Image (tube, rainbow, N blue to C red):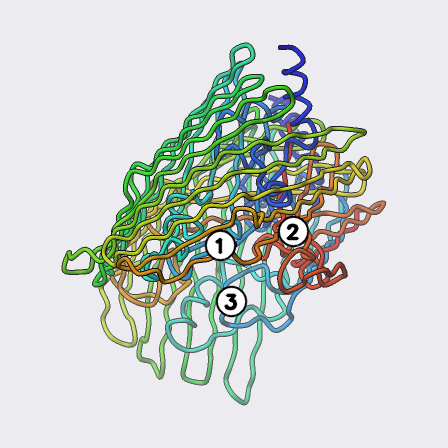
Amino acid sequence: MKNILLLFSLLFAVQAYATKARVLALANSPQLIDEQSIFANINHINSLGNFVSLESGLTAVSSTTTNTTSHAEGLVGVKLNADDTLVVALGHQDEAVIDSRHLASQLGSDFLRQENPVYVLWGHKGELNSYGVGYFYSNYEDKLTGASESSSGLNLGLTMGAWRYYAVYTLVNSAAAAANTRFDGAGYLAANIDYSGDTNLFYLRLIRSSEKASTSGVESSSNTVQVVRLGLTDSTPKDSSTFFWGGEVVSTTVDCRVLASLDCNQKYTSTLLPIWFGLEAQATSWLVLRGSVKQSILVNQSKDAVGYPAGSFTNTNGALSEYAAGPGNTVVAIGAGFTLQRLTIDGLLKASTTQNVNSTDFLSQLGLKYLF
Amino acid sequence: MKKLLVIAIALTAINAQATRARVTALANSPHLIDTATVYNNPADVHWLGGDYVNIETGATDTFGTPVTSPANGEGMVVRGMGDAKLGLSLGHQSSNASVAGLRGAAAGVPAAFQKNQQNPLELTYGMKSGEMGWAGTLVYSNYNDKVASNKESSLGVRLGARAGNWDAALRLGLTNTVEIGGTGKYTGTLGIGANGGYMWDQIYFNGALSLTGYKTENAAGTETAKFDNQTIRLGAMTTVKKDGSEFFYGVSLLQSNSKETVSDTKVTSLGLPVFIGVEADAASWLTLRGSVTQTTQLLHNSKTEVAGVTGAETAPGTGDTVVATGAGLKFNKVTVDGTLQASTAGTSQQLNGNSLLTQLGMTYMF
């Protein structure tokens, strides 16, 4: 068992400490261990050392974005001793909070994202088992206009041999756009189970979230989202490079109970079979190149009996829709990491979609990390 | 025989593991063996030096405004199992079922039907025994919007074989349809493409045949267009390899006949394009490449007839000189290729911070 764990940690030896740019360039593949992955899987914290990570981005997060990658944030991780790791993150917009707020914003009033969020995570590596605990908090109130937001939640994880169990739960997720317009999204739960083999990872993800919005006490929207993801990834390290591939089945069901202050009682459902492959290679002692391709194959079905806005869920376009085989979703991502002593600068090559490399189209999603 | 094999291997040794950008920069020369040429002759997977991952940058088509290849994102991975090779490609747009080919404006397809393959998937399998390798590829795509009654589907097969001094490939487009609700339907006929080559005394003789067509119907089922095209290419070329560089030149006889029955339009062309190219290892980490292609005015005829009346005729035709340049950056097992934006219309002749590389692709050899 120890050999398996050792091999598993060695598998990700190519720049295990990285940034949002790395995660995006590698297709958000679930086997990645990264300081960004600790928010979804807190067990990864026990693989980290001392670091400071800074992610470029906006301070004022637009309400039209659900993307957790577009805002500025910083993390510092410290090994308290050989077994304990503490990470503090400032500015991290967690999907447990903003996904449901984004949906509510698309369906009605514009609700704030997390304002000055703080996230504290602690992990302990034991001889047999390891675990992690995290807590996030944010708060804002404009006493004149009545605009406010508040969020808090727990992040728990347990590693027992090749099995990993982890969950994220929101205790508070509320916002007010004005004195009479309110949002409530508490009760988000993401429960996950992983099993790690020699080179592969099997995983099951169950996510349940809800959003309720009201105006002057009258419910304007109410939706519940359930997502099930069952998948497999495999990684093959060789000569300072890692090739990986993966596939999963993603089933999403959204129950609409209220929309535009009227009874809805309709659903959105989708089933997808995305597969992906990618690589991360140590090109030179100072340069890491990475890239991935991801696309749905054979199964790309969706039925939207509600008419959710474009971008809310897969294949939604603002009107009623039903796809037996949905539109193209091939995603290519290429990134680079520059290592200078203990400093690493990661970025996503804008050429991923533009094909161009020049002074106008070079790196985006810039992140900087220092190991100490 | 051994001398022929050596020549054949030498022809393909420089940066054989490359990308669309390399093929573009080298004028799509018929002698190239590349990760991009696998989509023409699947047997090329055995001649790339090993297993590989190839990622090509670009945007994605979502059945709206089409992305014209090679501007689309795609990727391919090939892994070996003993003498066999398995390949998986995502996102590649085949010439038979894309707006860059038979579904495009150049083929006279109405704008409503100019749609690319959606989420195309290609599976390749091949074996190599001794000097000869063969492979086959299955191509599939499907799209069905039940509300708008829009559909797209394609199914095709590619077969290829290659040995020391010869190569052959066959491509069959079995289904190729686009339906637009309230507008009509586009149906491709059985598309046949074949090409081959033979190396004889340092000259590579090559040829290609393409038989394609489509028909379109309006929403009432009335035929609005019926198009057929036959293209034949016969060519010869040679390469000179020296000191880490490869210089090649060749000529082709290119004949194309197309006919659209409903409007009674015929287009014929006959040309003698020549091409010259070079690929050189400028440094251990840098490969530079370029080519020029032009139809000689000795034979450069085209004629368009509508209902028997000549609408256009040139003999010889207008200038078609095309220069392409590119660079490949090599980092151990990773190669990053691009074409120089200096070759592009908007940034012609410029090399600066705003005009550097485009059509970026990356290949990793296991």
Residue at mark 2: B323
Judge by depth and name the residue closer to the eye, B31 or A30.
Answer: B31
Locate the N terminus of chain A by quadrant.
top right
Q: Are marks 2 and 1 on the same chain?
A: yes
Asked which quadrant contains residue B182, the reply is bottom left
Farthest-out residue, right: A341
In the picture, the disc for residue A198 is none
Q: CA distance from mark 3 to mark 1?
A: 58 Å
Residue found 72% across the figure and 60% down from its top: B349
The crowding category of the residue bearing disc 1, from other C-alpha atoms within 10 Å (few below 14, some 14 to 19, many at least 20), is some
Residue at mark 1: B315
Horizontal and vertical percent position of residue B108:
35, 57
Residue A199 horizontal side relative to residue B221, left or right: right
Judge by depth and name the residue closer to the eye, B159 or B64.
Answer: B159
Residue at mark 3: A65
- Asked if the residue under mark 1 is in contact with the one under mark 3, i.e. CB atoms within 8 Å, the reply is no
Total numbered circles: 3
Q: CA distance from mark 2 to mark 1?
A: 23 Å
Nearer to us: label 3 or label 1:
1
